[in-house]
Image (cartoon, rainbow, N blue to C red):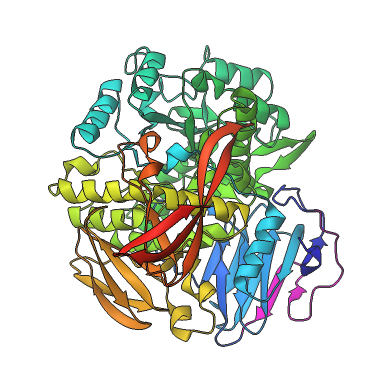
Amino acid sequence: MKTDAIKKYVFGKPFETNSTVEDIETSDGVPSYVTVSGDSIHITYNMGKNDKVYGMGEAVRGINKRGWIYETYCSDDPMHTETKRSLYGAHPFIIVDGEDVFGLFVDYPDRVTFDIGYTSINVIDITVGAPDYKLYLIEGETPLEIVRKFRQLIGRSYIAPFWSFGFQQSRWSYNTSRDVQSVIDNYRDNGFPIDAVYLDIDYMESFKDFTVSEQNFPDFGEFVKSVKAQNIHLVPIIDAGVKIEDGYDVYEEGRDNDYFCKDENGEDFVAAVWPGKVCFPDFLNPKAAEWFGMKYKTLTDLGIDGFWNDMNEPAIFYSEKGLERAIDKVTSYKGKNIGIYDFFGLKDTVLGVSNSPDDYSSIYHNVNGESVCHDTVHNIYGYNMTKSASDAFKKIEPDKNILMFSRASYIGMHRYGGIWMGDNQSWWSHIKLNLQMLPSLNMCGFMYTGADMVGFGDHCTEELALRWLALGIFNPLMRNHSALGTRNQEFYRFENRDAFRNLLKLRYALIPYLYSEYIKSVENSDLMFKPLSFEYRGDRFAEAVEDQLMVGESIMIAPVYEPNAIGRSVYIPEDMIAVKFRSEDDYSVQSYSKGHWFVEIANDEVVVFIRKNKALPLVKSADCTVNIDYSTLRFIGEIEDEFEYTLCRETGASNGESIISKENYSVSAPDNGTLKFNKI
């Protein structure tokens, strides 16, 4: 990598986040087009009228982030409306695309505010919480060049195991092994492919990490073996909070070895989440992180090879002191004639008990023997929880690649696991939000990602489920997940089972392409999901498109995300063919010239647009990833001469990482309507 295109500026005494892997020499004096002022906590840039701004990873609104104010602050908030400023992840990286083309990464592990034309329509004003941070400025000719340089700076992304590209079913309410087996049986009996079922908090004994309820999951190790024989992986949740309970080994070890975060008095900080009162492991203390990471062995020894880390912002229902303050405040209203402002105050008091800034300010970490307030390192807590697990897996299971993804994250965590897009809702707008987060997260290195398909909260409809599935089949992490108390949304529960079955089988036919493009994007520091503006620079219509994506080198997708639609308007940026799939074997092909078109897309259809002189590889679908048969490989496309395609396959694992083999194919113009292809 040419590091002269990346400048590093150091202000004050930054906390080391380990977000980068390249050693960049510190520069003096930022370029003239960027201003640093206000005791070095303000970074400003004057945008041109048509400048676009990309990045921010997990954030609301469109792919172009211009016109809103964002905060990088890991926040436990499931209501992802367009007015929100922060979500579960913190990714302080932007790309400015205009007369100047450059990227800015503000490496600061607490709150950073990005005012991108909100206060002043043509001004980017970045506010850092304290003058102790690193600023990386990355210059290049195009946004894609900026992404590649940035991705090389922050290191290679995590590669998930091949099986995790299969369909995964989750719900908060699978309370027993019988519930889990029933889900598996219903998918299998109805001919739906599936590779994994998730265990939410109810698999544990009293919500205690690294325990399994013997009553609800008797002989858990045997149950894991039983479902493995059915080619199903179980993926349990691990939460950040450790229940305070005498006799519970994880709690007692953490307490006795000072592995928990402290309060201002040096006592273990006590808060509450699912089990009631908990302590939080101090993941910034290397000894504590190693200790907690090795606890995953309790479950890997039973055959578990996938985990999702949750509640690691960290989420806090209440702290002892915060609850006491709130109760005193609420009690003070007793007997009063409560008017509008007092009522608002009462409501804010109750709602403010959870995830209170006062509580975060009361947490302290042990960093190399020094007490560090959580306020200054908030965004790297979840990152280091996931790193602790990833580091442990290489010791526990060095010859196995274990699935790991997290809710909270910061740039740098992408080297250790993926993320899902948090507790979303069964809203039509969240289909579009899923689509728009994909390229933004790729820009920040997060390649194994996806939303809770069909929505975690609220009640889905069959139409919404089908439309979301039509996008979900392209997400690397393809998980149907829903909350306790919502409508059951396992796909076999819906009336039109054939449509759901056909689309799920189409996903499995597409896996060789999706996995190959994922691997190539990781290895080349590229985007698997590209905005059209990255691929068709200078095309003003392509640059305005916010609801279509290029997926890998061959295809474009344009999902439907509105109810009662018979199709949608699509901008075709070059001559393409549209393949309208009703199933993997039932499809029609239509040619489109460059321009604006209305494309009819029924609820039970998926349309894939294939670029001219490119081809889409497909295989015959299977009931699970292990049974995908590459000998059934075929290509769909419009080839005038010859097209070369590299297919990537997982052939093993070493030191916790996938071993990938590559097969090169030459695809040429058809004889009798069928493309010819040969392995090179």
The answer to which of 638 and 321 lies nearer the viewer is 638
Q: Is residue 344 visible?
A: yes
Residue 344 at what x, y percent from top left? 38, 58
Q: Is residue 268 visible?
A: no
Q: Residue furthest front?
A: 671
Is 474 left, or right, of 584 in this rendering? right
Determine whether 176 is above or below 662 in the image: above
Residue 284 at what x, y percent from top left? 69, 37
Q: Quadrant of residue 572?
A: bottom left
Q: Quadrant of residue 550?
A: bottom left
Q: Which residues are magenta?
A: 23-47
Q: Main secondary structure of the magenta part?
A: loop
Q: Residue at x 50, y 66 (%)?
A: 530
Q: Is residue 34 magenta?
A: yes
Q: Residue furthest left?
A: 495
Residue 561 at what x, y percent from top left? 29, 65
Determine whether 530 is above or below 314 in the image: below
Q: Residue furthest bottom?
A: 49
